Image: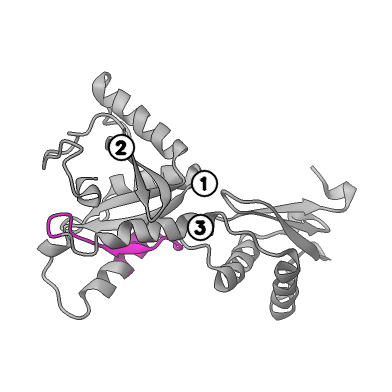
Amino acid sequence: LNALLREERAIVSEVPGTTRDAIDTPLQWYGQKVVLIDTAGIPKRGSVVPGVEQYGVLRALKAIERADVVLVLVDATEGVTAQDAHITGYILEANKSVVVVVNKWDLVQKDHATMNAHRAHIQRQLKFVPYAPVLFVSALTRQRIHQVLETATRVYQQRHQRIPTGGLNDLLQDAVARHSPPSKAFKRLKVSYATQPTVDPPTLVFFVNDRRLVHFSYQRYLENRIRERWGFEGTPLRLRFQSRDKKSKR
């Protein structure tokens, strides 16, 4: 937080757990109003003790619920820990957008391949959010600090992106032609059309003959095709399948 603001607005320490409460800091970012929320850390499951620490965890989870984009701070000298993955899981469950920020990059010995290797390792550890951008920064030297709010703003815009219905259905038609929907018990999935009723997070509704025929792998295939075309960087997509056949509705 202090590195982003270029002033001491929060108490910092090398000791984990120093931040006990969520701190809201409003600012203007190129004319856009932004609120930064510095949260308390979230310990591993089973390690939370009653009292102040437990209260801090609850406040951190509420901060995630209030946020549009959540920055997951990873220590470059430690890599992704179980706690980092746990926090990212909370973010995913809350359908929030996410940016992974790897701090203390100045302490890592590097060559021309180091950054790509670290990024690939982080993406493997956080494979359930493959769409999350990964930044390598140093709060101490301010290396690439400017990229944090730039990326968060871009991800916020992607979170509120709306796909034209015509363009979405053109892509859907092409995707189905390239990869036929699966079948089950001699009944094949038929996808009629799709629409995006809401943003924040982006929600896409696909009208099908029987949603029980939708396999997870085909859902992922459609999501990947949509991301190839429209990005949605750092943002989860909610794909909903609605049966048009009344007999197949639950």
Q: Which residues are magenta?
A: 120-141
The label nearer to you, 2 versus 3, is 3
Between 167 and 94, the one nearer to me in the picture: 167
The label nearer to you, 1 versus 3, is 3
The label nearer to you, 2 versus 1, is 2
Amino acid on which the number 3 mark rests in the picture: Gln
Q: Is residue 79 visible?
A: no
Determine whether 97 is above or below 56 in the image: below
Secondary element under disc 3, as helix, strand or loop, is helix
Q: Which mark is residue 95?
A: 1
Report if the CB atoms under discs 1 and 3 are less than 8 Å apart: no
User: Which residue is located at x 17 percent, y 62 percent?
Assistant: 105
Quarter of the image where one finds residue 172: bottom right
Report if the CB atoms under discs 2 and 1 are less than 8 Å apart: no
First reached walking from the N terminus: tag 1 or tag 3: 1
User: Which residue is located at x 31 percent, y 58 percent?
Assistant: 148
Residue 65 is situated, as x and y percent measured from the top left of the image, at: 46, 37
Secondary element under disc 1, as helix, strand or loop, is loop
Count of marks overlaid on the render: 3
Amino acid on which the number 2 mark rests in the picture: Thr
First reached walking from the N terminus: tag 2 or tag 3: 2
Query: Disc 2 to disc 3, how far (Cα)?
Result: 23 Å
Query: Disc 1 to disc 3, how far (Cα)?
Result: 15 Å
> Which residue is the site of mark 3?
157
Between 108 and 167, the one nearer to me in the picture: 167
Amino acid on which the number 1 mark rests in the picture: Asn
**The magenta stretch spans residue 27:** no
Viewport quadrant of the C terminus: top right
User: In this image, 95 relative to 113: left or right?
Assistant: right
> Which residue is the site of mark 2?
39
